Image (cartoon, grey):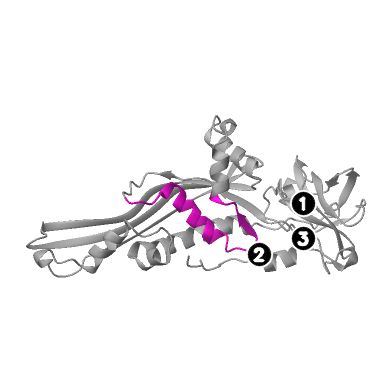
């Protein structure tokens, strides 16, 4: 599989998000978990007649492009398909079902979509055995690609991508002589989807451009949020209650359910907490994900180190 070019990195964002002079007790920082994403099978309306299964091939390929981002972990399609066989997950409406599957898989977000067009058309004019004219058109169109936050069952954003290219070689096809485009057209029915040879074909080249664009759009939505406003004096730990803390930030500060935040004593990071509930414009409740020493009232809140999506990792506890 040809590697997709990485367009967006979280390295600088993560560095700036942590407290100044980020060091935990013992000199080891608390690590932020990865963002886990499940791509469910897409609705296939393309009608491609070859051996490809576009319903799963398309999201798998999109996942390969997205997984080039170090902060993202894409859940394997085998695990997704196993979850889809669970009878209890089949009875819900589309968004609720997608979110339920995401929770079953421990995903932070789920992606669903529709394959409207994917293939190559060949138009022939005249008798190909005597002399004829042919044109070739490759088309890729993915619609209604929705990014769903598992924790709230909300659609974060909807995406689409469309690409097409046409070839109309000059000259006639005398006596049925095949053109290079004819061979490429026939190879679509035998080549493995997403293979090296696939990328050498016109449709594969078009797919590389389309999937890179779509994955970039999704990563932008995930990773490029405005920072939380931590400028007020109230942006500190207000109370500690067992495994939960109350923080002096809320909707007015652009804090969101699922944000992962460091808590700092001076310039030293002590803990990571995850927002579980926005209580008001300047108040939220968060769960302790990891800590190196007890959290105290007045600890400073650092900038988010996740993308505002609900994290289900080995560090976190079940809700």
Image quadrant of residue 172? bottom left
- Residue 9: % across, % down: 62, 66
Start-end of magenta stretch? 50-77
Answer few, some or many: residues within 10 Å of disc 3's Cα (few below 14, many 20 plus, some between 14 and 19): few
Mark 1–mark 3 distance (CA, rounded to whole Å): 9 Å
Q: Say left or right for 95 vs 232.
A: left
Answer few, some or many: residues within 10 Å of disc 2's Cα (few below 14, many 20 plus, some between 14 and 19): some
Mark 2–mark 1 distance (CA, rounded to whole Å): 20 Å
Residue 75 forms part of the magenta stretch: yes
Closest to the camera, between mark 2 and mark 3, is 3
Q: Are marks 2 and 1 in contact (CB under 8 Å)?
A: no
Q: Residue at coordinates 55% horizontally, 48% vertically from top-left?
A: 78
**Which residue is tagged 2?**
10
Image quadrant of residue 27? bottom right
Q: Are marks 2 and 3 in contact (CB under 8 Å)?
A: no
Q: Say left or right for 36 vs 61.
A: right
- Residue 271: % across, % down: 84, 56
- Residue 302: % across, % down: 80, 59
**Which residue is tagged 1?**
315
Looking at marks 2 and 1 on the same chain, the residue that comes earlier in the sequence is marked by: 2
Query: Can you say which quadrant of the picture contains the C terminus?
Result: top right
Q: Residue at coordinates 20% horizontally, 56% vertically from top-left?
A: 123
Q: Say left or right for 191 vs 176.
A: right
Give whichever of 252, 135 is nearer the camera. Answer: 135
Residue 278 forms part of the magenta stretch: no
Looking at marks 2 and 3 on the same chain, the residue that comes earlier in the sequence is marked by: 2
Against 286, residue 70 (above or below) is below
Q: Is residue 235 visible?
A: no
**Which residue is tagged 3?**
31
Tally of marks: 3
């Amino acid at each position: 599989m040809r590697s997709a070019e990485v367009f967006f990195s979280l390295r600088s964002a993560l560095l700036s998000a942590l407290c100044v002079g980020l060091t935990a007790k013992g000199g080891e920082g608390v690590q932020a978990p990865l963002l886990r994403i499940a791509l469910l099978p897409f609705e296939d309306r393309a009608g491609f007649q070859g051996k490809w299964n576009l319903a799963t091939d398309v999201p798998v390929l999109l996942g390969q492009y997205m997984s080039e981002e170090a902060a993202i972990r894409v859940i394997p399609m085998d695990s997704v398909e196993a979850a889809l066989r669970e009878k209890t997950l089949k009875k819900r409406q589309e968004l609720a079902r997608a979110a339920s599957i995401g929770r079953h898989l421990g995903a932070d977000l789920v992606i669903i979509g529709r394959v409207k067009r994917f293939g190559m058309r060949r138009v022939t004019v005249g008798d190909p055995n005597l002399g004829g004219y042919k044109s070739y058109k490759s088309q890729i169109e993915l619609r209604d690609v929705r990014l769903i936050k598992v924790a709230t069952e909300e659609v974060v954003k909807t995406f689409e991508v469309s690409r097409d290219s046409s070839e109309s070689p000059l000259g006639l096809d005398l006596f049925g002589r095949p053109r290079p485009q004819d061979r490429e057209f026939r190879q679509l029915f035998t080549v493995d989807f997403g293979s090296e040879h696939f990328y050498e074909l016109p449709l594969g080249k078009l797919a590389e451009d389309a999937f890179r664009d779509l994955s970039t759009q999704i990563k932008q939505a995930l990773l490029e949020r405005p920072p939380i406003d931590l400028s007020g004096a109230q942006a500190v730990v207000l109370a500690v209650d067992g495994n939960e803390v109350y923080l002096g930030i809320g909707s007015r500060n652009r804090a969101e359910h699922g944000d992962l935040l460091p808590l700092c004593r001076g310039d030293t990071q002590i803990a990571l907490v995850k927002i579980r509930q926005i209580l008001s414009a300047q108040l939220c409740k968060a769960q302790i994900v990891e800590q190196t020493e007890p959290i105290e009232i007045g600890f400073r809140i650092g900038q988010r180190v996740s993308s505002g999506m609900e994290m289900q990792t080995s560090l976190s506890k079940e809700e």
